[in-house]
Amino acid sequence: MNPIRIIKNLFVDFLLKVSGTWVGAPKDAPWED
Protein backbone atom coordinates (compact mmCIF):
# COMPACT_ATOMS: atom_id res chain seq x y z
CA MET A 1 0.00 0.00 0.00
CA ASN A 2 0.99 3.62 -0.43
CA PRO A 3 2.29 5.00 2.91
CA ILE A 4 1.19 8.49 1.89
CA ARG A 5 -2.38 7.24 1.47
CA ILE A 6 -2.29 5.55 4.89
CA ILE A 7 -1.09 8.76 6.55
CA LYS A 8 -3.71 10.76 4.66
CA ASN A 9 -6.48 8.39 5.76
CA LEU A 10 -5.34 8.61 9.39
CA PHE A 11 -5.22 12.41 9.14
CA VAL A 12 -8.71 12.61 7.62
CA ASP A 13 -10.06 10.22 10.27
CA PHE A 14 -8.48 12.40 12.95
CA LEU A 15 -10.09 15.53 11.51
CA LEU A 16 -13.48 13.81 11.37
CA LYS A 17 -13.18 12.73 15.01
CA VAL A 18 -12.15 16.22 16.11
CA SER A 19 -14.93 17.80 14.05
CA GLY A 20 -17.44 15.36 15.50
CA THR A 21 -16.26 16.24 19.01
CA TRP A 22 -16.67 19.97 18.31
CA VAL A 23 -20.10 19.41 16.76
CA GLY A 24 -21.16 17.27 19.73
CA ALA A 25 -19.85 19.81 22.26
CA PRO A 26 -19.63 23.29 20.65
CA LYS A 27 -19.01 24.87 24.07
CA ASP A 28 -15.65 23.05 24.13
CA ALA A 29 -14.55 24.44 20.76
CA PRO A 30 -11.17 26.26 20.95
CA TRP A 31 -12.62 29.43 19.45
CA GLU A 32 -15.29 29.48 22.20
CA ASP A 33 -12.70 29.83 24.98
Image (spheres, grey):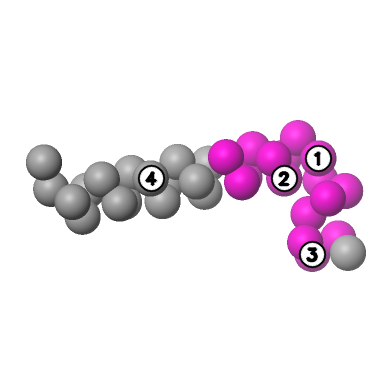
Q: Position of residue 7 (x, y in %)?
A: 30, 51
Q: How many marks?
A: 4
- Residues at badges 3 and 2 in contact (C-beta under 8 Å)? no
Secondary structure under the numbered disc 3 in the rendered image: helix
Of the numbered discs 2 and 4, the one sitting upstream in the chain is 4
Mark whose residue sits in front, 2 or 4:
4
Label 3, label 1: how far apart the Cα atoms are: 12 Å
Q: Please state which of residues 6 and 19 is positioned toward the viewer in this rendering.
A: 6
Give the residue pinned by disc 1.
25
Three-letter amino acid code at the position of disc 2: Trp
Label 1, label 2: how far apart the Cα atoms are: 5 Å
Give the residue pinned by disc 2.
22
Task: Please name the residue shown 78% across and 54% down the image.
Answer: 29
What is the magenta segment's predominant secondary structure? helix
Three-letter amino acid code at the position of disc 4: Leu
Three-letter amino acid code at the position of disc 3: Trp
- Residues at badges 1 and 2 in contact (C-beta under 8 Å)? yes
Label 1, label 4: how far apart the Cα atoms are: 22 Å
Q: Is 19 on the left-hand or right-hand side of 27?
A: left
Q: Position of residue 22 (x, y in %)?
A: 72, 45
- Residues at badges 2 and 4 in contact (C-beta under 8 Å)? no
What number is the disc on residue 31? 3
Q: Residues within 10 Å of mark 2 (few under 14, many from 20)?
A: some
Of the numbered discs 1 and 4, the one sitting upstream in the chain is 4
- Residues at badges 3 and 1 in contact (C-beta under 8 Å)? no
Of the numbered discs 4 and 3, the one sitting upstream in the chain is 4
Residue 21 among magenta residues: yes
Q: Please state which of residues 14 and 26 is positioned toward the viewer in this rendering.
A: 14
Mark whose residue sits in front, 1 or 4:
4
Give the residue pinned by disc 4.
10
Task: Please name the residue shown 53% across and 41% down the image.
Answer: 16
